[in-house]
Amino acid sequence: MIDEIKSLREKTGVSLDLCKKALEQSDNLGEAEALLRKWGQKLASKRTDRVTNQGLIDSYIHANGKLGVLIDLRCETDFVAKTDDFKELAHELALHIAAASPQYISAEDIPTEVVEKEKEIYTEQMKDKPKEMIDKIIQGKLDKFKKEVCLLDQLFVKDDSKTIRDLVNEYIAKIGENITIAQFARLEI
């Protein structure tokens, strides 16, 4: 049991006590990790109303020199902003942005005109379908569009079993502070 706790701790960065509780409530290491993720979601939702006025700006420049990313990642305290975990998250996010090319942080950031234009395109594509199906199909296509262009909804390029939102929530649980992505810029030649 001690080796499993250590292994889970190394994999997740969560406290030994939480690792032990997760292992006690599950049958194996995989289930314990999934349980910690769920708990991380709960911890993250409790922290979302906290102000994030500290943080750092991180950058990534691709080896060919033709692609670069700047990210403004925020947390609650300057102490956390200087930790290796926080810097690691900023770097992982910058790498993801370089690879996945999101346009917005979340669905709320998409301008209404863009959503309406997408609806218009999908409606035109579906004009010969039965009317009762069109709304459902359009909603499905809009949801897919949002997952493609919104950073928090994209699947993490290094681990497609989780979204960027899940990744950030894992770090919120690990670090113990609210973390937000304030802005990012992706430049490519």
Image: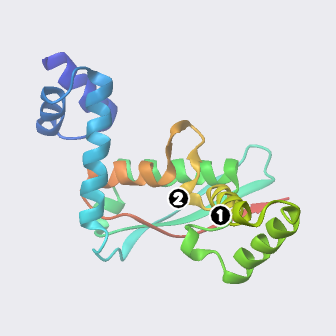
Q: Residue at x 56, y 64 (%)?
A: 71
- Residue placed at 15% from the left, 30% from the top? 25
| Residue 185 occupies quadrant | bottom right
Instruction: Please name the amino acid that badge 2 sits on.
Output: Leu
Q: CA distance from mark 1 to mark 2?
A: 19 Å
Q: Amino acid at mark 1?
A: Gln
Relative to residue 62, is residue 150 drawn left or right? left
Tell me if residue 42 comes above or below residue 23 in the rendering.
Answer: below
Tell me, for residue 152, which label it has, or none: 2
Residue 21 percent coordinates (x, y): 12, 34
Circles 1 and 2, Cβ within 8 Å, touching? The answer is: no
Q: What x and y, as percent, mark residue 112?
A: 67, 82
Residue 174 in sight here: no
Q: Return the residue nearer the eye: 141 or 166.
A: 141
| Residue behind mark 1 | 139
Kind of element beneath mark 1:
helix
Name the residue nearer the viewer: 11 or 141.
141
Foreground residue, 189 or 117?
117
- On the picture, is 40 further left or further right than 153? left
Q: Is residue 68 above or below residue 29?
A: below
Residue placed at 28% from the left, 69% from the top? 77
User: How many C-alpha atoms fall within 10 Å of the one at disc 2: few (<14), some, or many (≥20)?
Assistant: many
Q: Earlier in the sequence, mark 1 or mark 2?
A: 1
Q: Nearer the viewer, residue 125 or 145?
A: 125
Q: Position of residue 5 (x, y in %)?
A: 18, 25
Residue 183 placement (x, y as % from top left): 56, 71
Is 89 displayed left or right of 67 in the figure? Answer: left
Above or below for 75 versus 64: below
Residue located at (86% from left, 59% from top): 189
